[in-house]
Image (spheres, rainbow, N blue to C red):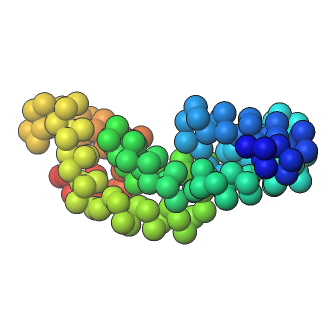
Amino acid sequence: MNQYKNRFDEEEKKAIGMALKYLALKPRSRKELEKKLSEKKFGEETIRLALKQIDNWGYLNDEEFAKSFLELKKFSGKGKIFIFRELKRKGVDEEIIKKILSQFYTNEEEHEIALSLVKKKFPDFPKLKSRKEIIKLKNYLLQRGFSWETINELF
């Protein structure tokens, strides 16, 4: 710990401490953490050094963040489109997102999740008769981030 105290100036120590505090509250992407530190008025160089140190300690990994985010959202009934959009908004690289989605969220899983959501919301599915019910169902799934392909497989 003494080595830690001597290696960084006061501003860097504060930035590192703040970053670790944010990560302790919930997992965050590199971009989210950078934004939080920037909001606290730390300089660009201080933020860069703090993130580099946290990365060296193994606490900052966008791929691991994306995996845990995907599992959480998949469990709560979100489709691939929703997850992709949210991870992109959180600053995760598009290539990482595509890799994680292809490895950990199969089309079959997405279909099963969509089907279970439909059955939960519309217990008499697939006996929906009215066009209005079908449109309502499709909109519900679209809002949860399911693709047209997945939605149309249900009908």
Q: Position of residue 116 (x, y in %)?
A: 19, 41
Residue at 69% x, 44% y: name it: 33
Figure quadrant of residue 55: bottom right
Would residue 53 appear left or right of 89 to someone viewing this image? Answer: right
Q: Which of the image's four quarters has the N terminus?
A: top right
Figure quadrant of residue 103: bottom left
Residue 35 shows in the view: no
Q: Position of residue 40 (x, y in %)?
A: 83, 34
Q: Is residue 71 above or below residue 25?
A: below
Instruction: In this rendered view, identify the residue nearer to me: 117 or 139.
Output: 117
Instruction: In this rendered view, identify the residue nearer to me: 97 or 125.
Output: 97
Instruction: In this rendered view, identify the residue nearer to me: 38 or 138.
Output: 38
Figure quadrant of residue 72: top left
Residue at 40% x, 43% y: name it: 73
Q: Is residue 141 above or below residue 147?
A: above
Q: Position of residue 23 (x, y in %)?
A: 61, 39
Q: How many marks?
A: 0
Q: Position of residue 137 (x, y in %)?
A: 28, 38
Would residue 110 appear left or right of 91 to someone viewing this image? Answer: left
Residue at 41% x, 61% y: name it: 101
Which residue, as the protein is rendered here, is positioned at the far front?
2
Residue 20 shows in the view: yes
Instruction: In this rendered view, identify the residue nearer to me: 74 or 44.
Output: 44
Residue at 89% x, 40% y: name it: 11
